[in-house]
Image (cartoon, rainbow, N blue to C red):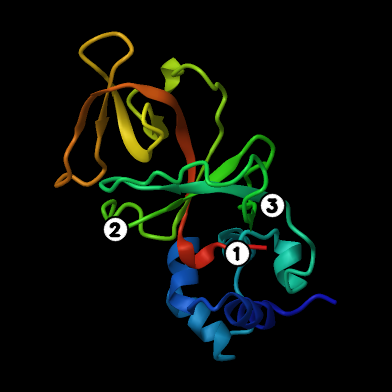
Amino acid sequence: MSMTFSEALKAAMSNRGISLRKIADVAGVSYEQLKKVGQGKSRSTNVDDAQKVASALNMTLDQFLNGGIEAPNTIAIAGRVGAGAQVPVFDAYAKGDGPQVECPQGLSPRGVVAVEIVGDSMEPIYSAGDLLFYTRHTHDCIPDDVVGHRCVVEDEDGMGWVKQVKPGDEPGLFHLISLNPGATTMWNKRLRWAARVRLHWPAELTRKV
């Protein structure tokens, strides 16, 4: 049975353990309006804002108004990556056997995997526990379309990183630019593979299943 927007909002906050302000920030809607709805001072909100709130919670509007009872698609977490620290646990799980997380609204789960951020060296862009979603198209080369973009990469030593990939000084070498301006750039590194980040999802909104 469908809930009112206010009931669905309260259910989402309770089920996810997320604050109203965080929902408003991620959804890009007015916190004051959502607050009025939650306090019963406003009976509802407009359809566009309702859709934004549902999308921020990884749900369709119908799922949101039904308490999220429809089973969403899931994506496997492949492992963990860092920016300024050695993280040798990138492929910590066999393919597809890692923990599962709900697929964010608007992203097809086909061919997509996620990695979890370790440490705080990518603040304020990415935080510990955040998930990055990517599609790895190749297994033995670096596609041209990754150059100049934020990528999940694995270096020749098997370490996982999140860096901006730039051409190196010689063919087959790459400069890995840190997202934090204060961190050290990795010069002329050989990579096993690199894949562009398709979506960043804050830790507060992820839901492992």
Which one is in front, 62 or 57?
A: 57
Circle 1: element type = loop
Q: Amino acid at mark 2?
A: Asp
Q: Are marks 3 and 1 in contact (CB under 8 Å)?
A: no
Which one is in front, 12 or 159?
A: 159
Residue located 58% across and 74% down the image:
16
Residue hosting label 1: 207
Residue located 50% across and 62% down the image:
27
Quarter that holds the C terminus: bottom right
In the rendered structure, the answer to whether residue 160 lies left or right of residue 53 reads left
Circle 3: element type = strand
Q: Nearer the viewer, mark 2 or mark 1?
A: 2
Let me know if residue 28 appears in the view. no
Q: Earlier in the sequence, mark 3 or mark 1?
A: 3
The quadrant where residue 118 appears: bottom left
Q: Amino acid at mark 1?
A: Arg
Q: Amino acid at mark 3?
A: Thr
Per the model, the C-alpha gap separating discs 2 and 3 is 26 Å
Circle 2 residues within 10 Å: few <14, some 14–19, many ≥20: some
Location of residue 199 in the rendering, given as x and y in whole percent from the top left corner = 49, 44
Residue located 61% across and 52% down the image:
104
Quarter that holds the N terminus: bottom right
Circle 1 residues within 10 Å: few <14, some 14–19, many ≥20: some
Q: Earlier in the sequence, mark 2 or mark 3?
A: 3
Location of residue 22 in the rendering, given as x and y in whole percent from the top left corner = 45, 71
Residue hosting label 3: 74
Let me know if residue 164 appears in the view. yes
Q: Earlier in the sequence, mark 2 or mark 1?
A: 2
Considering only vertical position in the picture, is 183 above or below 28? above
Considering only vertical position in the picture, is 159 above or below 142? below
Per the model, the C-alpha gap separating discs 3 and 1 is 10 Å
Per the model, the C-alpha gap separating discs 2 and 1 is 21 Å
